Image: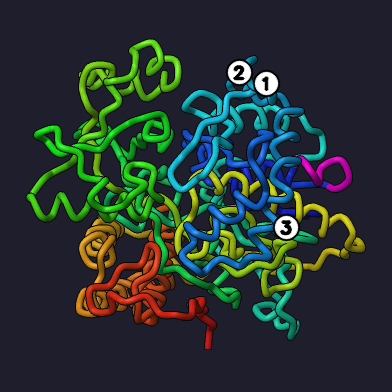
Amino acid sequence: MEQTDVLIIGSGLAALTTALHLADTLRVTILTKKSLQDSSSAWAQGGIAAVLADDDTMEAHVRDTLIAGAGLCNEAAVRYVVEHGTAAVQWLVEMGVPFTLDISHKTGFHLTREGGHSARRIIHAADATGRAVQRTLCEKIRQHPNISLLEHHIAIDLITGDKLGYGDSACYGCYALDNVSGQVKTFAAGNTVLATGGASKVYLYTTNPDVATGDGVAMAWRAGCRVANMEFVQFHPTCLYHPQAKSYLISEAVRGEGGLLKLPDGTRFMPDYDERAELAPRDVVALAIDAEMKKRGLDCVFLDISHQPAEFIVSHFPNIYQRCINLGIDITREPIPVVPAAHYTCGGVITDLSARTDLDRLYAVGEVTCTGLHGANRLASNSLLECMVFARAAARDILVKPAIAYTKIPEWDESRVIDTDEEIVLAHNWDELRRFMWDYVGIVRTDKRLQRAARRIALLADEISEYYQNFRVSNDLIELRNLVTTADLIVRCATLRHESRGLHMSRDYPQTDAVAVDTILRRT
């Protein structure tokens, strides 16, 4: 059994920020299932939304967030995040993150604007903000003497008092598989933080890395936490459409800097859907693209910024430019083929303003959570902000707690399982799940589609449960088990919502109810 003061599961911005705010006082262990920099945070292109300019206000950022959230945001959570956002960004500046400079601006930094924002408030590092932030913080993590980093370790399940027979619902740590040795390890922790990211790999097409398999949501659900609003899956409007471009996002900032969405014949279509046109919130733009593709039988639409000067394009979007050039697309001369793709999980594990979950000593931070900030649709560039603000809140809450004595936890029992000789079953189940989720639980839904998905999920869940009980765990089995659990939660939430709101669009219930209500699931 390995012991630590704080166990953090995940390695994105939420995890790293939490660790760095705790490590001067407590011993911290970070578990990450791949390498330290493998996370959705590292893939974030656009930037971080915060009130930094004199011509912007907290009230304006709050208002923009509430509008994007389609009536379902928790205003107290929105205000908390916005009011603590400036300090969070300043901390990153102090850490040495190389944000793009603009000496003509009073802040000293270049601020861009994205869909749904009424002002320029997105601080960024060119078009690879997440990578710049992750690289900077990863260096701090590796250098800190109080932080133990265990890469290639995937959490299997949380260890709770209920499971240990203690009669309480506290979290005592987790079991995790060391993917290098194949050994299952036991981790005992005074406090545990879930920072595992989202679940967009449950869909066939996504902008997310392969690690986004809903691990934290599934583990928390199995441990007894409430989960909310899983029906609200954000589909990013513009994922690069190319056979060699797996999961490559075309940043919202391209539209923020003048990019126009067009049909193959060059006709714009966004003004027909929303007066904000290309700068409408993501759900509006994704729905419009989806509608045009289905109506006209298109494989994709096109995002055109070639009317801007070539020097402007290359300097603002160097990584997007180079990626497209490598695929034979010169974005200074021609439009970019794009399609919507699953991008962000707005729902998740319910937490309070201190990032506490329903289980004592278990916190959750970042995309794994449902804090109330995003409501029915996340406003662009609020995600990294949420990671930082709630990571700092979790750290503050943990630091004022009294020290906790470690509990002896039984080791993982593999005495009644065997090695599998049917790995192909996992691959087939993974592919089947992602395909029917894309077909039946995508941008537009119906009751019949949801029922079909539910039936298939039930069959997969039974098959995977039997597999889990009889064979030694593997990384693929753990991820597939979590994906099926997450898919079930998405479908259950979607089935319960009898209206269309934000990211959840139902042909059977096209109206929006007068009163917005969260979809909350509890284990029975």
Query: Which of pointers 3 and 1 indicates the residue nearer the eye?
Result: 1
What type is the residue that disc 3 sits on? Met
- Comes first in the chain, label 1 or label 2: 2
In the picture of the structure, the residue carrying the numbered disc 1 is 108
Q: Position of residue 23 (x, y in %)?
A: 81, 42
**Please, what secondary structure does the residue beneath circle 3 have?**
loop
Is residue 192 at least partly visible in the picture?
Answer: yes
Q: Residue furthest bottom?
A: 524
Q: Secondary structure at mark 1?
A: loop
Q: Is residue 219 above or below residue 125?
A: below
In the picture of the structure, the residue carrying the numbered disc 3 is 1
* Disc number placed over residue 501 in the picture, else none: none
3D distance between C-alphas at marks 1 and 2? 5 Å
Give the x, y percent position of residue 201.
37, 53
Q: Dot 3: few (<14), some (14–19), or many (≥20) neighbours within 10 Å? A: few
Magenta-drawn segment: 20-26
What residue lies at 35% left-to-right and 70% top-to-bottom?
A: 464
Q: Are marks 1 and 2 in contact (CB under 8 Å)?
A: yes
Measuring 27% from the left and 62% from the top, which residue is drawn there?
442
Mark earlier in primary sequence (2, 3): 3
**Camera-side residue of 332 and 199:** 332
